[in-house]
Amino acid sequence: MAEFIDLNGLTFNCMKVLQRVENGKNRSGASWKCQCVCGRIKIVRSEDLRTGKIKSCGCKKKSKHRLTILFELKYPKKQIKGCWEWESYRDKEGIPQFANGRNARLFAYETYVGGIPNNMKVVNSCKNPGCVNPKHLILQN
């Protein structure tokens, strides 16, 4: 019999494992209650998580906002003083970078707030260089 591997709390692609659930009759292997980055809950087999067969609840396949889903994986949902602290790559100045060197703050602003006029730049009102919370991003000359 294979050794049990506890997947609680682990994240596989867009799916975060919440807890183990009982298998239905005639099902082999462990099953897990998982939450997708879009918020939907889905029961997934261990093998499907570990092999990458299941990457999301299905939203990733359907979504035209694939980059938004990937963006949301790069900061924790637990906020400190409302900041979304970027946990991925930063440039030499500490500016969060996303998707082939694109400024993550610009992406956040454009995605959640709107377009950026040519003569304006996006800065953090909270003065936290790693914050990508659109509510903390403002336009400045």
Image (cartoon, rainbow, N blue to C red):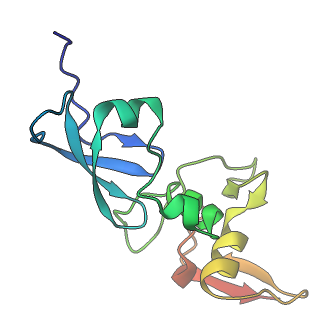
Pinpoint residue 70: horizontal percent, then vertical percent.
Answer: 57, 57
Q: Nearer the viewer, residue 128 or 72?
A: 72
Image height check: is 126 above or below 87? below
- 45 on left or right of 99: left
The answer to which image quadrant residue 7 occupies is top left
The answer to which image quadrant residue 10 occupies is top left
Quarter in which the C terminus is drawn = bottom right
Pinpoint residue 129: horizontal percent, then vertical percent.
Answer: 61, 63
Quarter in which the N terminus is drawn = top left
What residue appears at the point 40 percent right and 30 percent down from the top-left corner? 50
Q: Nearer the viewer, residue 21 or 120?
A: 21
Image height check: is 120 above or below 7? below
Q: Nearer the viewer, residue 3 or 92?
A: 3
Q: Is residue 109 visible?
A: yes
Q: Nearer the viewer, residue 36 or 80?
A: 36
Pinpoint residue 42: horizontal percent, then vertical percent.
Answer: 29, 56
- 6 on left or right of 63: left
Q: Is residue 131 visible?
A: no
What residue appears at the point 44 percent right and 44 percent down from the top-left corner? 54
The answer to which image quadrant residue 79 occupies is bottom left
Pinpoint residue 56: horizontal percent, then vertical percent.
Answer: 45, 53
**What residue occupies the far front of the structure in this picture?**
26
